[in-house]
Image (cartoon, rainbow, N blue to C red):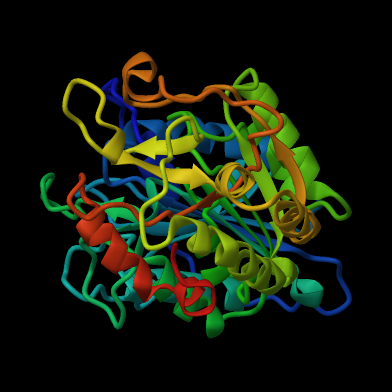
Amino acid sequence: MKQSYISIIVFGMMVLMTACSDNEAPVTRSAEGSNSKTVLIYMAGRNSLESAINADLKEIKQGSRQIAEDNNLLVFVRRNEYEMPWLARIKNGQVTDSLSIKDMGIASSDGENRASDPIIMEGVMRYAFNHYPAMNGNYGVVLWGHGSGWLIMDEVKCARNNRAFALDCGNVNDNGLWINFTSMAEIFKGLPHLKFIMGDCCNLMCLETLYELRTACDYIIGSPAEIPAQGAPYDQIVPDLFADGKFYTNIIEKYYSSVSGKLPLTAIKTSEMDNVALATRQALQPIKEKLAGGFADLTGLIHYYYTDTRNGFYPEYNIFYDAGDFIRTYAPSEVYQQWCQALNKAILDTRMATRWSTDKSWNQKYVDFVVTKEKYHGVSLFITQDPTRGDYAKYNEDIKKFAWYGVVGSI
């Protein structure tokens, strides 16, 4: 979510007591003969977002009053070292069927009970979907927490070594570890196919990450940029998480309106991501020939994140460049138009923002571009740069670990 949530709020344990006081195991339900849908909001809040959990739980409870009786709205909450992470159903504004991970028989890999531990994530999702089955595969997951797109972060030890979500500080504030999106994609392979994944986290809408998750679900909804700490307006969008038709349009429109239009948002159809990858590979060929082994000048292109935390502006720390802004700038017009045709089939809806909430000074870090309708495309792309600048020596190698790189290559 939410790269920044600076204010520190001292809040009581009433939600904890409400959530964890009922340890009666829920009865496994059958979805036969019903139109039941199941949505799990996975709240990874053992970090600077801890103080945002209560407000969002309140919104989720309000939203739950507007969904059908046989629908299953579930929350997994990882908050702090004082409470065991727990899973519960939210029904008619109340927390029910709450169980800790211990109650569910889930033991973390390192004893820290991190939401970013693949063992915990897989165990929680498997338990949730087994005990609250949905009719016709109508499952959805909301990823609530910090996100870092394709950036590699230190992670809980697991099979692979890629991208990050769910920073979890364990029981030690300065020991935050993540789960990568490749590991997450492996988890999803063993679970029911999802209708959607929504990212209430920063920088999800990278072409590289979208491609990584393409087989896990039908739709992905999120932002290519940083998002505000308060995140989505759950009291408004919970009914849409269970809706049919263009439910994704309702979600991004309500989210967009709740932040006064100051957040780019996009919904994509994952079945088109293979075609987007092939179209991108074709579009990059004339660009590579034009660059002749050199590096592209990215001055003036939209970028959705800035990695350096020092005062001052250093262009080499701009990353997550708008994919279409780059291809539009460097590819022949007819090549760009062909690429847009493929992208437009994947993008079901999008909202443009000329600026967005960030934990950095916009007037310091984002002064080198202007967002326009012609430049904005709602998804980002990694662009190889001079390895002597910023962190690009690492980035240029890290990106090769993506499935996207195997199909598309790099600039």
Q: What's the residue at 31%, 18% (across, down)?
A: 364
Q: What's the residue at 36%, 43% (across, down)?
A: 16
Quarter of image, res 65:
top right
Give the farthest residue toward the top. Answer: 363
Image location (x, y in percent) of residue 138: 75, 68
Camera sees residue 27: no
Q: What's the residue at 18%, 63% (across, down)?
A: 112
Q: Is residue 218 above or below residue 357?
A: below
Image location (x, y in percent) of residue 315: 30, 33
Q: Is residue 232 left or right of residue 181?
A: right
* Residue closest to the eye, 89 or 234: 234
* Residue closest to the eye, 254 or 361: 361
Camera sees residue 348: yes
Q: Is residue 3 left or right of residue 379?
A: left
Image location (x, y in percent) of residue 327: 60, 50
* Residue closest to the eye, 103 or 180: 180
> How many discs appear?
0
Quarter of image, res 402:
bottom left
Q: Quadrant of the C terminus?
A: bottom left
Quarter of image, res 196:
bottom right
Q: Quadrant of the N terminus?
A: top left
Q: Is residue 284 above or below residue 378?
A: below
* Residue closest to the eye, 108 or 363: 363
Image location (x, y in percent) of residue 354: 58, 22
Q: What's the residue at 25%, 73% (across, down)?
A: 108
Q: Is residue 43 left or right of residue 188?
A: left
Q: Is residue 97 above or below residue 258?
A: below
